Structure formats: structure tokens, C-alpha cells
Amino acid sequence: MFYERELERWFVTRHADVRSCLRDRRLGRNFRHVGTEEEFDAAEPLDPRWQAFWDTERWSLLWVEPPEHTRIRKLVAAAFTPRSVDELREPCADLAHELLPGERFELLRDFAQPYSIAVICRLLGVTTDRSRDLLDWSHAMVKMYELDTTAAQAETATAAAAEFRDYVVSLIAERRRGPCDDLVTRLAEARVDGERLSDAQIVSTIIVLLNAGHEATVNTLGNGILALLRHREQWERLLAGEVGPAAAIEELIRWDPPLQLFERWVLEDGVEIAGQPVPRGAKVALLFGAANRDPRAFENPDVFDVGRRNAAEHIGFGGGIHVCIGAPLARIELAAALRALVERLPDLDLAEEPRRNRAYVIWGLDKVEVCSSNGITTPTRSSTGPATSSSSARPSTT
Ligand code: HEM
């Protein structure tokens, strides 16, 4: 743990410390329910120019703290049930196969993004004709979560938020007129302890489900497939069926997580982190990437091992009250994508050296150009293909 003067934040690096911060109710994602912006030193006032963006954040699960968070999370959980997620298992497998290109393609643009958006469209019960808009809105809005957002990016994010809001408002109205078996209808109908979600709360919820879910899933595939192609012997273990996709994705998330940093405010006096007193009003940045490589939690943490016994103890999905509500869906979605890649493109390889994007919090790659000499020849959904690719081990330079 260390303090960075320029960024005015404490940085927490160890697995045990990050985990205990996530579970500590004296730390919060927001402070506005317990104090003013003057009391919270590193806080910047919400710029009124970006009001439409802040309005869509207002009821986001990632913005609110108890008791609002408890109430909204219960209602969202009543709509986003384990059964509704499990029903997406087959569609995920089908979509992964349908959308997988062959020969040479850019993994993020040509597969991971359309696939992840198609899964969200299934969840919401909307047709994929708006997927380009959803993608553009999501890309624009998540720029607001970086450490160095420019005014131009904030302006674009705000315009995207307004369009996204109008779209969801019309969707809610449609579902109220004609209910369907989808998440928008279930959110509109959810009742817990006599309470229900307002339209503004449904708007924030749909937006956070897309924005929180989409970028993380796409970047897990980008970072993870790059890791597999650079460690060919690990890809071979998948091809041989020695390790299944559901187990492997945990190591993908541990080794190169798509979300590197989440922040908390210290809401009360008397808080100590890793033995260090941290005053009320301070900002704390939890470094997930560092925690996932902590040798106290993972043996030989820098070794990429898809069969790692305790890989699922990674911090990738967070913990405590804000723990990722989409983790069960993300696991199904990622495993289905990895299975399709392994089965259909066993000789997948990098066609070009990928470039890191310039973002830090949402950690990913600009482009991952890949190729396969096979193209898509064997649509075998049920079996894992033979180990046909070269076994040269690549350097692990990520
Ligand atoms: C690999 C994919 C994913 C990763 C690594 C991931 C990671 C996370 C993390 C770390 C948090 C907690 C943030 C914090 O504590 O400050 C979180 C929260 C959240 N995630 Fe995910 N997520 C993924 C996929 C998804 C998906 C697919 C969805 C929805 C469809 C989703 C929806 C959410 C929501 C709504 C929250 C806020 C929960 C709350 O505050 O109560 N995520 N996610």
C-alpha cells in the first residue's frame, strides 16, 4: 500500500488487503450520502455540463450505497435471476458459433464485441438492429471512468447517455404495453417488500448492465486469447481437453484482468488499511491486477497456468456488496466463446503484434489481429478438436 501525491490516492496492492477493503462497509463507492464535496478532499464537483450523464448514473448500482443500494440490488436480483441467466447458456453457445469468423479477423471488432452485444440484446429481449448504437454508447460512456477524461470525451459520453436514456425509456413503455419474457419486462414488474423500481432506476440499471458487462467481457477475451496464443502450451491443454473452458477463464481473468482498478472513499474516522491509518475523506484505489499476482495468494503468480487449482480466488469480480451481479452470466458467456474458438479454430495464431489501448482502468487491447489456416471447417459443437497446432511456447511479455 502506498500514497501517490499527484493522484491524491492511496493504492492498495495485496490480495488480502484489497479483499478486506471491498468488504469493509466503512469504505464506499460514493460519499454523497454521508458528507459534502468539501469534506472529501479528492472529490471534484459533478460538472453540470455533463448532467445528462450524471442523471443516468444516479441510480446505477455502482453509484449508490446502502440503504439505496440494498433496495435496488434486491429488485434487480429479483429480475436478473439465476434461472434467467441459465437460460442464456444455449443462446451463448449458438451465438459464439454463429458469430465466429474464420481465416483472418480482428478478434475484438469482428468477434468479441458483436458476440457480447448479441448476448446483452438476448438478455434485454431486443433485436440486434440497435447493437451498433449500444456499442457506441457504451464505448463513449465508459471513458468517464478513466483517471484522465478530457472535456471532449465527457461531452461525447453525455450525448451518448442522453440517447441511451431515450432508447431505454421507449423500451420500458413498449414492455408496459406488451410484456415479454425478458429482463426489461422483469425489471418493470419486479416487486420486493412492496417496493418497485422507478423508470429512472430501470434506465440506470439497464445502462450499468450493458456498460459494466460489455467492456469487461470483450477485454477478457482480448487479453485472455492473447495470453493463450503467447503461451501455446496452455492453448494446447485446452485443445487436448485436459482443461475445460469454464476452468480456464478463471485464470484468464486472474492473469490479465480487464478491470485494473476500483476506487473507494473512506466514509468514517478510525479506518486502518494494511496497518496504516487512512483518514475519513481519503480516496483509496484497489489494484486488482496487482492483487491477482500476489504471491501470498497464488503460487508462482506470474506463471500463466490454465489449470491453476485456486485461480477462481482472483479478485476480478470484486467482493462485498458491489460484487459483480453479472459474474454468472460472464462465466457462461466467456466459456462459450472460448469453447467455440478452441473447437473451430484450433490453429488460431496472432497475425500481428497487438497494441495495448491507452486506457488504464478498463485494461485491454486496441486490436488483436488473428488468423487460422483452417478457417471454419468443422462445426462440431459437442466435441473438443484434436491438438493440431504447433507446440512452440511463446514468450510471456504482456
Ligand atoms: C469478465 C467480465 C466481468 C468482470 C471482470 C466484471 C467485474 C466487475 C467488478 C470488479 C465489479 C465490482 C466493482 C466494485 O466493487 O467497485 C462489478 C460490478 C458489476 N458488474 Fe461486472 N464484471 C463482468 C461482467 C459483467 C456482466 C456480463 C454484467 C451484466 C450483464 C456485469 C454487471 C455488473 C454490475 C451491474 C455491477 C454493479 C454491482 C453493484 O454495484 O452492486 N458485469 N463487475
Image (tube, grey):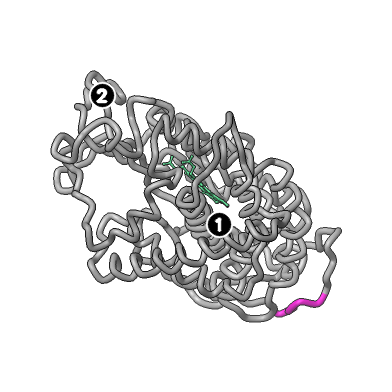
Q: Residue at x 25, y 38 (%)?
A: 283
Q: How many marks?
A: 2
Q: Tell me if I can see residue 14 in this picture.
A: yes
Q: Nearer the viewer, residue 307 or 122?
A: 122
**Would you place residue 280 above or below residue 240 in this image?**
above
Indicate the amino acid at tag 2.
Answer: Glu
Q: Residue at x 54, y 61 (%)?
A: 218
Disc 2 crowd rating (10 Å Cα; few below 14, some 14-19, many 20+) is some
Question: Which of 120 and 179 lies nearest the eye of the viewer?
Answer: 179
Quarter of the image with the C terminus is bottom left
Q: Quadrant of residue 349?
A: bottom right
Residue 268 is tagged as: 2
Q: CA distance from mark 2 to mark 1?
A: 34 Å
The residue under label 1 is which amino acid type? Thr
Callout 2 touching callout 1 (CB < 8 Å): no
Magenta segment, prevailing SS (helix, strand or loop): loop
The secondary structure type at the circle numbered 2 is loop
On the picture, is 175 further left or further right than 361? right
What residue is shown with label 1?
A: 217
Q: Which mark is residue 82?
A: none
Horizontal and vertical percent for residue 141?
39, 62
Where residue 360 sits, quadrant-wise, is bottom left
Which quarter of the figure is the N terminus placed in?
top left
Which of 300/79 is in front? 79
Please give the range of residues in magenta. Answer: 373-377
Q: Is mark 1 within 8 Å of ligand 1?
A: yes
